Image (cartoon, rainbow, N blue to C red):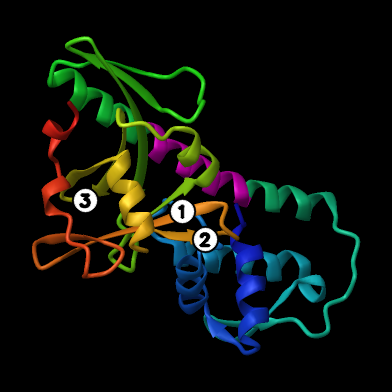
């Protein structure tokens, strides 16, 4: 997964001109080079770039052109990074990683709870082998992959699925549950594996990261939920737990 700074460098190199940090973030997410479940990825991007300039000075990859607008530093000096700078970078990256870990684990517990209330014998896997939850009901075994995202500042839920995991677990009893976490409550988009495969074929789910990941964008518009763009309305799969059978 690209860090915010790596993603910013890649976007600024590609564009060849200064950009506002919100535009950098938007393009990084759309191109699939940035993976984050945070609610405010643009704020994280700004914080990462600002911190890099503050602690590295002339040795930073970035320069501030105007408030909130950054470019690559054409006169970057090669400096030996101090322990303080290295530690600061680790702390910033750890904050983002921890935020994602809390979000992911919270989503798993939400899904497990919903399954238990519906009569499934469900358990969160102790070791991540591609399936987050195993559930049994009426002698049928189901594998559940849980992905959780906060609604970001672009009013979209963004998820990434590793291609290797997707291709390894490709049977009819595999379900992907996307937890849509919002301030007014949670929703669950429940997709059987075959529906996921269909949406990959239809390009509603995009290949990103040089084909190593699939990017899932989910959004609500005028009371309906869409996958990718407005051509793929998915209301049938929203909170429809009866699909798991």
Q: Where's residue 160, x and y in %? A: 45, 50
Residue at the (91%, 60%) spot, across then down: 80
Residue at the (14%, 15%) spot, across then down: 119
Q: Which residues are magenta?
A: 92-105
Q: Please name the residue that numbered disc 3 is placed on.
A: 183
Q: Is residue 170 left or right of residue 220?
A: right
* Label 2 crowd bin: few (<14), some (14–19), many (20+), radius 10 Å: many
> Split into 4 quadrants, where in the image is the C terminus?
top left
Q: Nearer the viewer, residue 224 or 75?
A: 224
Label at residue 214? 1
Q: Nearer the viewer, mark 1 or mark 3?
A: 1
- Above or below, 53 against 70 in this view is above
Badges 1 and 2: C-beta atoms under 8 Å apart? yes
Q: Nearer the viewer, residue 199 or 160?
A: 199
Residue at the (30%, 62%) spot, across then down: 156
Q: Is residue 103 magenta?
A: yes
Q: Indicate the secondary structure of the residue bearing disc 1.
A: strand
Cα–Cα span, label 2 and label 3: 29 Å
- Above or below, 33 against 108 in this view is below
Q: Considering only order in the chain, which callout, 3 or 2, is on the residue closer to the N terminus?
A: 3
Q: Indicate the secondary structure of the residue bearing disc 3.
A: loop
Q: Nearer the viewer, residue 123 or 77?
A: 123
Q: Considering only order in the chain, which callout, 2 or 1, is on the residue closer to the N terminus?
A: 2
Q: Where's residue 140, x and y in %? A: 24, 15
Cα–Cα span, label 1 and label 3: 26 Å
Label at residue 208? 2
* Label 1 crowd bin: few (<14), some (14–19), many (20+), radius 10 Å: many
The secondary structure that most of the magenta stretch takes on is helix
Q: Indicate the secondary structure of the residue bearing disc 2.
A: strand
């Amino acid at each position: 997964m690209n860090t915010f700074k790596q993603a910013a460098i890649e976007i600024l190199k590609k564009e060849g001109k200064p950009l506002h940090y919100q535009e950098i973030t938007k393009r990084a997410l759309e191109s699939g080079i940035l993976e984050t479940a945070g609610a405010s990825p643009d704020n994280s991007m700004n914080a990462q770039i600002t911190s890099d300039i503050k602690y590295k000075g002339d040795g930073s990859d970035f320069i501030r052109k105007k408030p909130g607008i950054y470019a690559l530093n054409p006169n970057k000096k090669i400096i030996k990074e101090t322990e303080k700078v290295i530690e600061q970078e680790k702390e910033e990256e750890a904050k983002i990683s921890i935020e994602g870990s809390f979000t992911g684990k919270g989503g798993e517990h939400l899904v497990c709870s919903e399954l238990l209330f519906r009569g499934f014998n469900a358990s969160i896997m102790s070791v991540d082998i591609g399936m987050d939850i195993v559930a049994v009901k009426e002698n049928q075994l189901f594998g559940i992959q849980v992905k959780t995202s906060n609604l970001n500042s672009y009013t979209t839920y963004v998820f990434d699925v590793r291609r290797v995991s997707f291709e390894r677990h490709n049977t009819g009893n595999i379900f992907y549950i996307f937890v849509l976490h919002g301030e007014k409550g949670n929703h669950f988009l429940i997709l059987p594996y075959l529906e996921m495969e269909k949406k990959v074929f239809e390009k509603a789910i995009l290949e990103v990261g040089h084909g190593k990941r699939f990017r899932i964008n989910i959004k609500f518009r005028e009371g309906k939920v869409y996958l990718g763009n407005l051509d793929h309305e998915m209301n049938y799969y929203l909170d429809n737990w009866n699909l798991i059978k």
